[in-house]
């Protein structure tokens, strides 16, 4: 086994496109290998997902069932793909989605996860360029004058790689690890992602979360909330918490009642957000701040920003 190169400007950017809202329905993979701060290799392949294409996904990425008839399945392509990511640092935009796709795809073919660590160019961009209106791949790429044909797996992987390189250049850091330490961003790994956390008891006020289901099948797999764990705190002004949770679930989020190490977003109602600015913090806010201090990449989102994202 090769020694992991985690202290250099070496990493592999990846991107998946899926045929439907099932994470293991990979239909396209983009891979960009960076060595010593330079793009050294690019690979793109279509994948036969062995499942049906949803019209919404095809509308986004333009891939249909006829285009993948002669393409390899994920199981057939896995030995090639594994060579790129084993013992490497992986970068992806909204990495929780891409790592989730990888994990579910490996489960489907009964393969274990290789050794790697991963970072998220979305979270990196939020730290390095905090004043951008949003940090979607297209927005950051446009700001950095990076050419992008969005939802093409190779183009998205390349843009993610270039964003990471620009971030290192701006912060004068020499590796993803150094950049992450500078901005208190925790790099993930299969071991940490699979670590079982003790389930916190749900408060009676959040018991409704267990019964919420997405109202529509086609989900935008590139939405920041897709696959993310979301916790709500405080009274919301524009809507009730169940309605807010329904909006989030419709975007592919997993709504939970308590904050823990798997939380990705804490959504704060306007009334509590005002208190938060004044230094008055709920128990959930205090717990999130403690986790952020330890390096967990949790984002605090105000009610108005939440509404802009879900509507």
Image: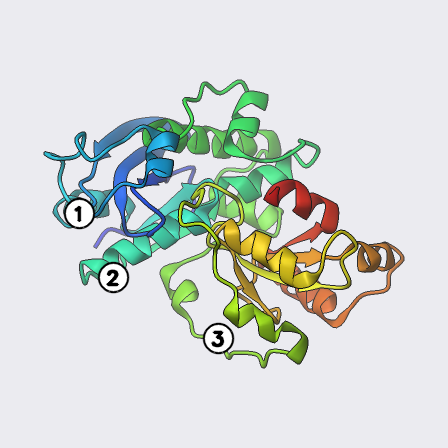
Q: Is residue 41 above or below residue 175?
A: above
Q: Is residue 27 visible?
A: yes
In the picture, the disc for residue 207 is: none
Residue farthest toward the left in the current orientation of the protein: 70
Mark 3 and mark 2 in contact? Answer it, CB < 8 Å.
Answer: no
Task: Please tell me which residue is depicted at 56% across the width and 29% down the height of the picture.
Answer: 140
Q: Position of residue 141 (x, y in %)?
A: 52, 25
Residue topped by disc 3: 197
Residue at the location (27% across, 28% down)?
Answer: 41
Please state which of the two labelled residues, at mark 1 or mark 2, is closer to the viewer.
Answer: 1
Number of residues whose C-alpha sits closer than 10 Å to that of mark 2, classed few (under 14), some (14–19) or many (20 or more): few
| Discs 1/3, front | 1
Residue occupying the far right of the picture: 278
> Mark 3 vs mark 2: which is more N-terminal?
2
Q: Along the horizontal axis of the image, is 274 left or right of 162?
A: right
Give whichever of 248, 233 is nearer the camera. 248
Q: How far apart are labels 1 and 3 at the CA level? A: 33 Å
Q: Taking 110 as reference, is 147 left or right? A: right
* Residue underneath mark 2: 107
Q: In this figure, what is the number of numbered marks?
A: 3
Q: Is residue 18 left or right of residue 258?
A: left
Give the distance between the C-alpha atoms of the residues marked 3 and 2, in whole angstroms. 20 Å
Q: CA distance from mark 1 to mark 2?
A: 15 Å
> Closer to us: mark 3 or mark 2?
2
According to the image, label 1 marks what residue?
A: 50
Q: What is the secondary structure assignment of the residue under circle 1? A: loop
- Expressed as whole percent of the image width and height from the top left, the position of residue 303 reads 73, 50
Quadrant of the image for the C terminus?
Answer: top right
């Amino acid at each position: 086994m090769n020694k992991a190169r985690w202290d250099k400007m070496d990493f592999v950017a990846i991107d998946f496109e899926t045929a439907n809202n099932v994470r293991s329905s990979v239909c396209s993979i983009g891979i960009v290998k960076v060595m010593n701060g330079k793009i050294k290799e690019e690979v793109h392949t279509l994948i036969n997902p062995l499942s049906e294409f949803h019209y919404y996904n095809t509308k986004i990425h333009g891939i249909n069932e006829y285009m993948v008839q002669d393409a390899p399945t994920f199981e057939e392509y896995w030995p090639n793909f594994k060579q790129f990511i084993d013992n490497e640092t992986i970068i992806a935009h909204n990495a929780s989605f891409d790592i989730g796709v990888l994990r579910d795809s490996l489960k489907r073919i009964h393969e274990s996860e290789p050794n790697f660590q991963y970072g998220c160019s979305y979270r990196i961009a939020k730290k390095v360029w905090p004043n951008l209106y949003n940090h979607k791949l297209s927005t950051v790429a446009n700001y950095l004058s990076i050419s992008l044909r969005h939802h093409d797996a190779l183009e998205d992987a390349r843009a993610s790689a270039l964003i990471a390189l620009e971030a290192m250049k701006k912060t004068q850091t020499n590796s993803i690890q150094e950049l992450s330490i500078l901005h208190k961003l925790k790099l993930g790994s299969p071991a940490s992602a699979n670590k079982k956390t003790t389930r916190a008891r749900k408060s009676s006020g959040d018991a409704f979360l267990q019964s919420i289901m997405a109202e529509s099948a086609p989900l935008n797999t590139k939405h920041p909330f897709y696959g993310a764990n979301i916790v709500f705190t405080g009274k919301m002004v524009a809507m009730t918490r169940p309605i807010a949770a329904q909006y989030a679930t419709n975007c592919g989020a997993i709504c939970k009642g308590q904050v823990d190490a798997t939380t990705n977003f804490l959504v704060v109602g306007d009334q509590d957000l005002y208190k938060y600015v004044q230094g008055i913090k709920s128990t959930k806010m205090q717990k999130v701040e403690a986790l952020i201090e330890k390096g967990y990449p949790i984002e605090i989102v105000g009610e108005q920003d939440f509404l802009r994202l879900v509507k």
